[in-house]
Image (spheres, rainbow, N blue to C red):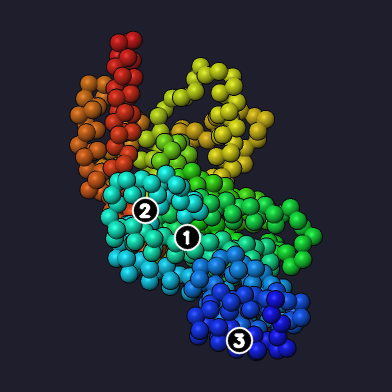
Amino acid sequence: MATFAKPENALKRAEELVNVGQKQAALQALHDLITSKRYRAWQKTLEKIMFKYVELCVDMRRGRFAKDGLIQYRIVCQQVNVSSLEEVIKYFLHLSTEKAEQAQAQAQASEIALDVEDLEAEKRPEDLMLSYVSGEKGKDRSDREMVTPWFKFLWETYRTVLEILRNNSKLEALYAMTAHRAFHFCLQYKRTTEFRRLCEIIRNHLVNLNKYRDQRDRPDLSLPESLQLYLDTRFEQLKAATELELWQEAFRSIEDIHGLMCMVKKTPKPQMMAIYYSKLTKIFWVSESHLYHGYAWYKLYILQKSYNKNLTQKDLQLMASSVLLAAISIMPYDHKHGAHHFELENEKERSLRMANLLGFSLDPKKDNKEMLSRSALISELISKGVMTYVPQEVKDLYHLLENDFHPLDLADKVQPLLGKLSKLSDKLSSASPVPEVQLEQYIPALEMLTTLRVLQQKSLVWML
């Protein structure tokens, strides 16, 4: 282990070793100094050493060395000069990102560069054998060897930084920034495996935050600034999950946000709640939970109408049309009728869980079927005056399917109106949390409802 009288001497020696091509020796010299107990008081020279140290770690892809050095530097900095640690970590992230982007640009083949399912998986012997037996092109192989290691290193960098910054009130802003950049990385390169892993890492950090309440410098989520940072991170996670179409992860992100709200007993700003409900409409639609999709649209509509003064008349019309069509698209019968007791209990538990996510408080001891139901939702929409905002075509559709009695020609009357829904669909203004409304997505459910109404009405005729 090399010892130096002054830190400046270690930096000078490292630069000399780099100049003669001995990067490993230079890295080891700096590592010995950073981890030495002799230099635990912060000074500007240590910052310069850390900049050189992370340069060498990135250049040689030494992730473990980088983690060791940054942990030691955090101990030196966190009580004296947190901004120095921030600068070093930002520089580390910048270098890692730059190297990955340079490698990709050189290979000129992003689709080849990331043709790896899991960046943490080691290359298996059978994969190597297969690449030679199958006659893999030399360029493809060199591209993969050039680019994939840098993306693996960049992913390792994000993991390292998040681990170093976790659950520290003095570093929480930098932690949030790193998490956002990691989400962007997953989104930009469609890294679904890493995104799931990243969500789990952040989730575990919050679990540990609640578990170890006597921890030094623990973030206080009752403070508005801290809570906002944690919520911003979860909302960024939710947006990325929906864009990647990882609906299960998106739902877990919704639960994370709801859990945070319950933990601190505070409701986020209306703008954030609008994003929350808009993402819920997507999640429930994809999962074919039409009842909860309708209620999510209802909550979004009410929230926007009350707080968003920048909505145009066209925005209100499109949102009102969506919420009404979402409500009448719910099938008017009980899917679980005649189900086993165990299934009914599971459904009851699920209903309570969904109601909580939607902001409704239900008594678990009572039968809450009528509290969240198709009829209750439609009644609520009528009482809130939604019908005054919807176009005539949507009004006619509602009256035909809910009020009128046309056993012989109901389908003929409904069909032209369904055909007009796609023409009514449009993009919303930038003031809306929903970029676009596609009313035609409700056509299959409305056709099924029409068939049901025809059968119901004809059976009444035969009974008479």
Residue 115's tag is 2
Q: Are marks 2 and 3 in contact (CB under 8 Å)?
A: no
Q: Residue 308 in the image: state x and y as whole percent.
A: 45, 61
Q: Quadrant of the C terminus?
A: top left
Tell me which label, 3 or 1, sits earlier in the chain: 3
Dividing the picture into quadrants, the one containing residue 411 is top left
Dividing the picture into quadrants, the one containing residue 409 is top left
How many numbered discs sit on the rendered protein? 3
Left or right: 325 as drawn, with respect to 61:
left
The answer to whether residue 414 is visible is yes
Report the residue that reaches farthest toward the top. Answer: 463
Kind of residue at badge 2: Asp
Kind of residue at badge 3: Arg
Dividing the picture into quadrants, the one containing residue 30 is bottom right
Q: Residue 405 in the image: state x and y as whole percent.
A: 30, 25
Left or right: 103 as drawn, with respect to 121:
left
Label 3: few (<14), some (14–19) or many (≥20) C-alpha neighbours in 10 Å: some
Q: Residue 72 in the image: state x and y as whole percent.
A: 69, 72
Q: Are marks 1 and 2 in contact (CB under 8 Å)?
A: no
* Front position among marks 2 and 3: 3
Kind of residue at badge 1: Lys
Which residue is the site of mark 3? Answer: 13
Secondary element type, mark 3: helix
Q: CA distance from mark 3 to mark 1?
A: 30 Å
> Relative to 341, is 125 above or below?
below
Secondary element type, mark 2: loop
The residue closer to the viewer here, 34 or 327, is 34
Which residue is the site of mark 1? Answer: 152
